[in-house]
Amino acid sequence: MSTITTPRLPSGFNEYLPAEQIEFNRLLAIIRTTYEHYGFAPLDTPNVELSEVLLAKGGGETEKQIYRFERGKNDLSLRFDLTVPLARYVAQHQGELAFPFRRYQIGRVYRAERAQAGRFREFYQCDIDTIGSYSSVVDAEFPAIINEIFEQFDFGEFTIRINNRKVLNGFFDELGLGAAATDVLRIIDKIEKINRDDLVAELHDAGCSGEQVARLLEFITIQGENDEILHKLETIDINNEQFQTGARELRDVLMALRAMHVPEHRVKLDLTITRGLDYYTGTVYETNLNDHPEVGSVCSGGRYDNLTANYSKRSLPGVGISIGLSRLFYKLREAGIVKP
């Protein structure tokens, strides 16, 4: 008698029944159509990259999270995001591309992290990036795209929160944080996930003095309408060029968003938005559903100075956003927002 194998998926991998797949595909189609409406060209890179290319920035936590294997003389890895393949693609084909290069890519990525609710080992990311432009108008285009996509999703009101890493980095310089600045950024990035006492304790552990912690918390919790926050940034007694440049860029982005007729009630300057990744250097974004804060960020991204630093001597700045659709879809189902 033959043995029957139990049908099952590996932990951290997912599939849908037809009704769910139809709803997932509807959201995917909205994203794709909007990206194309704004003039972004499609890109489809292989799921597999050479490990030395994928890990060119260094191993660390990334190396622990990739699926890596060898075939013959090739050391290969499954891509863990769509940004590193984009960097490799742009560096490899820069002589054949017209800049600014505007691309979108929708595809599965893989991370060998601990599987848990809403955290998958295979999931869809939906990315757009503009490479080769320093314009603040380009920075403003991405919140306009987020606005159009989430209007069509029809999940209720949402808020696009915006900050600028130059503002934060300039303020950190003013505080004299030095080498602790990177750790402080990552701690602030967790501000909505931990209580104030734990936040203060982590800042002290990172090497901040009591005065630095007090000034930092006072600064990042500045409240008011967008113009009021801008006025405070522009009149605060900080003589730091990087800080002042970041404040000007925030004003330019807000002015461009008004010209694009993005509803002002959906855009909020928020000095707690850091996007903890090291490569962000300017405008940063996070988007949240107003009635469902438990869902967390549903779209995020920002500006970076040199996408291809590990693959080319040519400086190529860029800005982009990503929607992690698989994780978002799971959270929306759990919150009862999506009902196939």
Image (cartoon, rainbow, N blue to C red):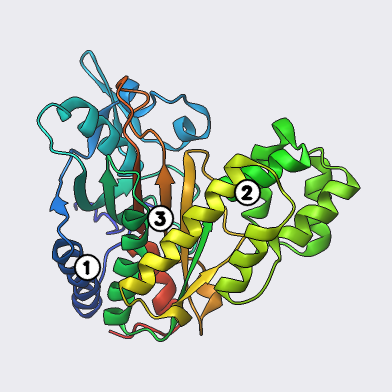
Q: Earlier in the sequence, mark 2 or mark 3?
A: 3
Q: Amino acid at mark 2?
A: Leu
Query: Which residue is under mark 3?
Result: 120
User: Which labelled disc corresponds to residue 168?
Assistant: 2
Nearer the observer: mark 2 or 3; the answer is 2
Of residues 8 and 304, the one drawn nearer to the viewer in this rendering:
304
Name the side, left or right, on which 256 lies relative to 148. Answer: right
Name the side, left or right, on which 268 lies relative to 56. Answer: right
Q: Is residue 17 visible?
A: no
Between marks 2 and 3, how big is the CA–CA gap?
32 Å
Q: Amino acid at mark 3?
A: Phe
For the point 50% across and 81% down, the residue is: 290
Nearer the observer: mark 2 or 1; the answer is 2
Query: Which residue is under mark 1?
Result: 28
Residue 66 image offset from top left, x and y in percent: 39, 35
Circle 2 — which element? helix
For the point 19% across and 51% down, the residue is: 2
For residue 129, above or below residue 157:
above
Occupied quadrant, residue 252 = bottom left
Report the quarter where the C terminus lies: bottom left
